[in-house]
Image: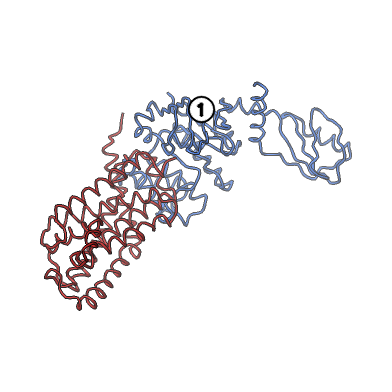
Chain colours: A red, B blue
């Protein structure tokens, strides 16, 4: 008699998620603490020391203005980093085969890894928010949008991490995207400034950066201010998330980089 | 019922290498089946296809009546696989590896923990349950991989060279364990380089060479084809030409070393007496244990002779 495939996938998902959570907290010195230290330094240097000379942006003290961007930056880097390193190490040590030979559906494997990325992103974001509260007062102007943006962006970058891991053949391949793509785009995406501060042509160029829409959507959720309309911001976030989901699922389904 | 039924299976990799060239094979339920072949013959690719780690180019694979193309989840549920290379998560504890693996097959955590304790005990690694796999010895890792493959209690267990690099004592313990599993009704497919291993465990055998099955018969019949065996002799003094004796073939390997090929039922006492009569005193005599190589050579010669 056929086993209940739904039951297999449900228990399989829980097992994979538990494994991912155990991994995050087993190596907490690598996964949780460094981002918190980095963000504390950002708050001290950019917020407290330099920020006091910059003054207010959109009526908010500079420290408060950069806080949502820094929280979002930690979500992006940690969601991405968690999935890319976990999936790639599974590929490298070949224990990913444990999942590939199992009856779990590709979608379940995808959801398991993405959930791990979301949990790491949210854990680090919570810690960074606590750190931020030592430096400034934070409010949440639009809780629903704030929550939605956090979840969608952590899903989006977890998916990006998985896609990167599928194509990666060595450790260099998993550091190229964070170093040469994510970090520059995040820095230029308005974490530390409003694009209103940029000269004309640079404002137009800045609008081509998808990070701008992500960071500003989150800033809108928290502070109620944004350089772009929230509708455009949410459209960009949803479009990216759905597109990356389709690509990641296709790669798992076809076995690109993981099945011969 | 066939535990495994493969029809005209082919695999061409992207680099155009054709690893499997139309293999057809049946393994009966409850069998202990050996899949033998030299490196690069297509064994691991065949197993990869059966276990969904390799996408086939064409052909049909059926496991306990489930078609791999239509019911892949059911096929996977029926199979437990022990791969050739160690593929354990180096930083995960032995017991966690087992419990998680069971979860991927839908086994509840409570039941998975029970089974993990059972298989760790049966494979004599229970004292290492809370060690990360990186700290286990090679033999323990192999046994942990067998335990992992059994966690969902599959009907078909596929072992791809499970005893490679394992010392003889552990190898024999593993053999005894596998025999017991087979006696309990589990179908087992074993690939190995050691004909002795296949000979002592398996009832039926298929031999793959260059992507083709060149032999598929009962172990008894295949071994019968090895009607001659070879001994390596070392003599006290330097050896000259040895005259012919009772269908034996002498081949000098060095000034003191000679290989002697003789019928399996040849009389060793009469050989020693004969050599003494020639003034040759034997210092040591060792059987040449590469029977698999001999078998391959013989099968390839037969194939060539029969076109």
Q: Is mark 1 on a helix, strand or loop?
A: strand
Query: Which of these two is toward me, B171 or A10?
Result: A10
Query: Which of these two is toward me, A174 or B155?
Result: A174
Horizontal relation, residue A136 to residue B58: left or right: left
Quarter that holds the C terminus of chain A: top left
Q: Quarter-wise, where is residue A48 in the image?
A: bottom left
Horizontal relation, residue A242 to residue B29: left or right: left
Residue at image coords 22%, 70%: A131
Q: How many marks?
A: 1
Q: Quarter-wise, where is residue A210 in the image?
A: bottom left
Tag 1 residue: B23
Horizontal relation, residue B108 to residue B24: left or right: left
Query: Which of these two is toward me, A50 or A85?
Result: A50
Relative vertical location of residue B298 with respect to residue A98 in this rendering, above or below: above
Q: Quarter-wise, where is residue A218 in the image?
A: bottom left
Mark 1 belongs to chain: B
Residue B124 position in % (x across, y down): 47, 48
Mark 1 Cα-neighbour bin, 10 Å: few <14, some 14–19, many ≥20: many
Residue B290 position in % (x across, y down): 66, 38
Residue B194 position in % (x across, y down): 60, 38
Residue at image coords 15%, 73%: A56
Residue A114 position in % (x across, y down): 29, 50
Query: Which of these two is toward me, A68 or B275?
Result: A68
Q: Name the residue furthest front.
A: A201
Quarter that holds the N terminus of chain A: top left
């Amino acid at each position: 008699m056929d086993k209940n495939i739904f039951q297999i996938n449900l228990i399989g998902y829980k097992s994979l998620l538990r494994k991912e959570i155990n991994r995050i907290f087993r190596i907490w010195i690598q996964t949780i603490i460094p981002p918190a230290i980095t963000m504390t330094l950002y708050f001290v240097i950019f917020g407290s020391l330099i920020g006091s000379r910059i003054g207010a942006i959109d009526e908010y003290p500079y420290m408060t203005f950069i806080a949502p961007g820094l929280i979002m930056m930690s979500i992006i880097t940690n969601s991405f980093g968690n999935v890319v390193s976990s999936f790639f190490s599974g590929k490298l040590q070949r224990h990913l085969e444990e999942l590939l030979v199992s009856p779990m559906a590709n979608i379940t494997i995808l959801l398991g890894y993405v959930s791990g990325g979301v949990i790491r992103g949210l854990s680090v974001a919570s810690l960074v928010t606590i750190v931020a509260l030592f430096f400034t007062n934070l409010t949440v102007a639009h809780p629903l949008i704030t929550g939605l943006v956090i979840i969608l962006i952590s899903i989006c970058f977890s998916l990006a991490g998985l896609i990167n891991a599928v194509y990666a053949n060595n450790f260099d391949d998993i550091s190229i995207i964070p170093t040469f793509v994510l970090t520059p785009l995040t820095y230029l995406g308005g974490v530390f400034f409003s694009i209103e501060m940029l000269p004309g042509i640079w404002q137009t160029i800045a609008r081509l950066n998808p990070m701008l829409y992500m960071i500003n959507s989150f800033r809108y959720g928290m502070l109620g201010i944004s350089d772009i309309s929230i509708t455009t911001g949410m459209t960009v976030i949803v479009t990216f998330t759905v597109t990356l989901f389709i690509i990641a699922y296709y790669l798992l389904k076809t076995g690109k980089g993981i099945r011969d | 019922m066939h535990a495994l039924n493969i029809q005209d299976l082919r695999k061409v990799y992207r680099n155009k290498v054709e690893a499997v060239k139309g293999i057809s094979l049946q393994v009966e339920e409850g069998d202990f089946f050996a899949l033998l072949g030299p490196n690069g013959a297509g064994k691991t690719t065949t197993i990869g296809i059966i276990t969904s780690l390799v996408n086939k180019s064409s052909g049909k694979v059926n496991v306990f009546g489930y078609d791999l193309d239509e019911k892949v989840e059911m096929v996977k549920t029926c199979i437990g696989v022990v791969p050739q290379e160690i593929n354990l998560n180096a930083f995960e504890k032995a017991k966690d590896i087992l419990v998680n693996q069971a979860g991927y097959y839908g086994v509840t955590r409570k039941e998975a923990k029970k089974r993990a304790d059972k298989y760790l005990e049966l494979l004599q690694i229970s004292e290492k349950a809370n060690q990360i796999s990186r700290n286990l010895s090679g033999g323990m890792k192999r046994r942990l991989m067998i335990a992992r493959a059994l966690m969902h209690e599959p009907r078909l267990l596929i072992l791809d060279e499970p005893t490679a690099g394992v010392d003889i004592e552990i190898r024999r313990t593993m053999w005894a364990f596998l025999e017991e599993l087979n006696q309990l009704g589990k179908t087992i497919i074993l690939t190995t380089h050691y004909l002795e291993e296949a000979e002592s465990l398996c009832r039926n055998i298929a031999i793959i060479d260059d992507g083709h099955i060149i032999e598929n018969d009962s172990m008894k019949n295949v071994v019968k084809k090895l009607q001659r065996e070879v001994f390596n002799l070392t003599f006290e003094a330097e050896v000259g030409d040895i005259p012919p004796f009772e269908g034996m073939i002498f081949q000098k390997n060095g000034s003191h070393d000679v290989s002697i090929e003789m019928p399996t039922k040849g009389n060793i006492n009469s050989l020693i007496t004969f050599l003494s009569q020639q003034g040759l005193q034997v210092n040591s005599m060792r059987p040449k244990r590469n029977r698999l190589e001999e078998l391959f050579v013989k099968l390839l010669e037969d194939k060539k002779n029969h076109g």
